[in-house]
Image (cartoon, helix red, strand yellow):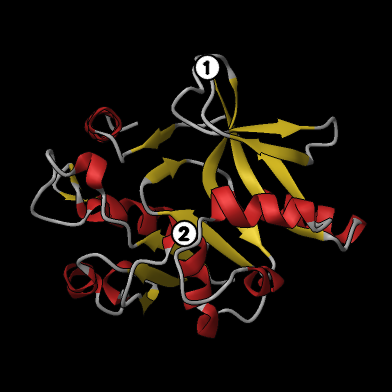
Amino acid sequence: MIALILAGGLGTRLRHVVSDRPKPMALAGGKPFLEYQIEFLRAQGWTDIVLCLGHQAGQISQHFRDGRKWGVRIRYAVETELLGTAGALRNAAPFIDGPFLVLNGDSYLQADLPALLAFHRGQRAADPQTIGALAAVHVEDASAYGTLELDEGQRIRSFREKASAAAGWVNGGIYVLEPEILSHIPPGRPVSLEKETFPLLLERGYRLYAHPVSAFFVDIGTPAGYARFQRHVQEGS
């Protein structure tokens, strides 16, 4: 199964801390954040990777090239203009020929990927309207995230915008998706997977499920999150 990493954003929240490189190339322990994601994928059996790039794409592709150094095959879907998280998937359509894995290029979650895949396949077998599953993380303060409203069967009922500083389930930034999702992403403009495509799919009667994950999770897109990931690496966690 192919894995796509969404690594094309501008990284404006981190710009004053990491100004000389794109956000996924922010260093921790002497190597880029994106390298940790690739090693994470390889350790769980994923060797066919597509990097969805935009901002400063050349710096990333020059570093990783064909991926052979990391024991994987890396290919590139490069945007000529920024297309958002969903638009990046549509731009990568030539590489997609079946269910696929997606990772956000600015978050890190030590999820069991085969378990997430098995969960999705089970839900899909039970209900063909299932179009995807995402890794969900329970946090004590969900104010920095959009939260998920789930039913008793872990089906996602709605995606809520950033709320108060209360505990809740949040999107962990890892998905297994069916290829038909691409037909629901309009071409030629920026589209957000989280704010537009996922809610639209629910409106159209498709099913999305949340697979709970209890593991280290961090968004490196903020200075505080980036510092936390650096500490995680230094501690060898």
Marks 1 & 2, CB-CB < 8 Å contact: no
Measured from the top left, where is residue 172 in percent x and y? 53, 40
**Which is nearer the eye, 198 or 70?**
198
Q: Is residue 4 left or right of residue 129?
A: left
Q: Residue at x 37, y 37 (%)?
A: 219
Q: Residue most toward the left? A: 20
Q: Quadrant of the C terminus?
A: top left
Q: Can residue 175 be seen in this snapshot?
A: no
On the image, numbered disc 1 is attached to which residue? 164
In terms of image quadrants, where is residue 81?
Answer: bottom left
**Which is nearer the eye, 92 or 110?**
92
Q: Is residue 221 left or right of residue 194?
A: left
Q: Label 1 is placed on what type of residue?
A: Ser
Reading the chain from its start, which is encountered first: label 1 or label 2?
2
Measured from the top left, where is residue 200 in percent x and y? 69, 55
Q: Residue most toward the bottom? A: 94
On the image, numbered disc 2 is attached to which residue? 85
Q: Residue at x 19, y 74 (%)?
A: 58
Q: Label 2 is placed on what type of residue?
A: Thr
Q: Can residue 18 be seen in this snapshot?
A: yes
Label 1: few (<14), some (14–19) or many (≥20) C-alpha neighbours in 10 Å: few
The local secondary structure at tag 1 comes to loop
What distance separates the C-alpha of mark 1 from that of mark 2?
A: 25 Å
Q: Which mark is residue 16?
A: none
Q: Is residue 163 left or right of residue 118?
A: left
